[in-house]
Image: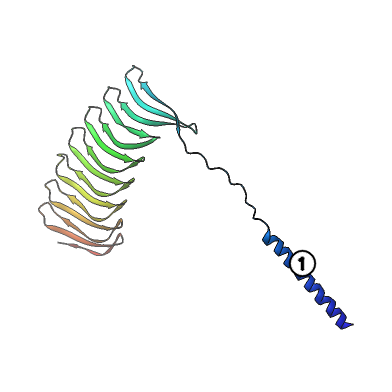
Amino acid sequence: MDLFKLLVSSLLVIFALGSDAALYSQESSSEPIYLDEPEPEPPVRIVLQETKTENYEDEKPRLERGLAKLSDDQVVNHGTYVEYYRNGQKFAEGTYELGLHVGEWKFWYPNGQLCKTVSFKAGKPHGTWDVARPDGTRESTRSYEDGLRHNQWINYYEDGEKRKLELTYNMGQVEGQRLLYYPNGQLQQQIPFENGVMQGTIITWDEQGNKVSEMDIEQGKLTGQTRKF
């Protein structure tokens, strides 16, 4: 009797395994099911272009710009852009491409003096920027790379020739020596940077070129005592 029960149990197990194997075999041999993926959005395109002029209350020109209507119903600046002060002097001139600043742009002071010549790439500052004061003297020279401060930056004294401040950026971070000068051209202070953080020895001089002090900086923090001379 026990032997009979054991035999029946074994047959049931074999049958169950056989059924599962058959089911697995059927599932494995069936074709895979793929869900339909939505179609990608078509790229935005220009459907209409026009040039628009806006005036001040006294009918003097305030703005001349190109506009573009896009396939997603946006309306953006596209093409030449010129803006004026109320006195009729030009304020800004440059180019937009689908709403982004591109290429060279110029800006003026109300007296007609050129303020700065700048450049953009896909809406971001890129390249060298030259900045002047209202009297025409050079104020600063700046440089960008894809929107980040990069390479040498210089500020000038009122004569536009003598350097006041000089430092170098590496993709947005100060790198190397930050140099500050007296009006007579003598170096006043140098501060070392690594990866945007003060690191090393800060040295200060007087206007005659005599060393005044030294201090050691580690990761932006003063270490030890300031040494005075």
Whether residue 5 sits left or right of residue 73 in the image: it is right
Residue at position x 25%, y 36% in the image? 117
Residue type marked 1:
Ser
| Scheme of image coloration | rainbow
Could you tell me residue 83's position as x and y percent? 32, 27
Q: Is residue 210 above or below residue 83?
A: below
Of residues 136 and 52, the one nearer the viewer is: 52
Quadrant hosting residue 222: bottom left
Quadrant hosting residue 58: top left
Q: Looking at the image, which residue sits at the far left? A: 208
Q: Please give the count of numbered marks on the rendered protein.
A: 1
Could you tell me residue 103's position as x and y percent? 30, 37
Residue at position x 25%, y 44% in the image? 142
Q: Quadrant of the N terminus?
A: bottom right
Could you tell me residue 43's position as x and y percent? 47, 39
Residue at position x 23%, y 39% in the image? 130
Q: Is residue 117 above or below residue 201?
A: above
Q: Quadrant of the C terminus?
A: bottom left
- For label 1, count other residues whose C-alpha is less than 10 Å away and answer few (under 14), some (14-19) or many (20+): few
Give the SS element for disc 1: helix
Of residues 122 and 223, the one nearer the viewer is: 122
Whether residue 131 sits left or right of residue 78 in the image: it is left
Whether residue 98 sits left or right of residue 118 in the image: it is right
Could you tell me residue 14's position as x and y percent? 78, 73
Q: Is residue 58 above or below residue 219?
A: above
Quadrant hosting residue 220: bottom left
Q: Which residue is mark 1?
A: 19
Q: Is residue 159 above or below residue 225?
A: above
Q: Looking at the image, which residue sits at the far right? A: 1
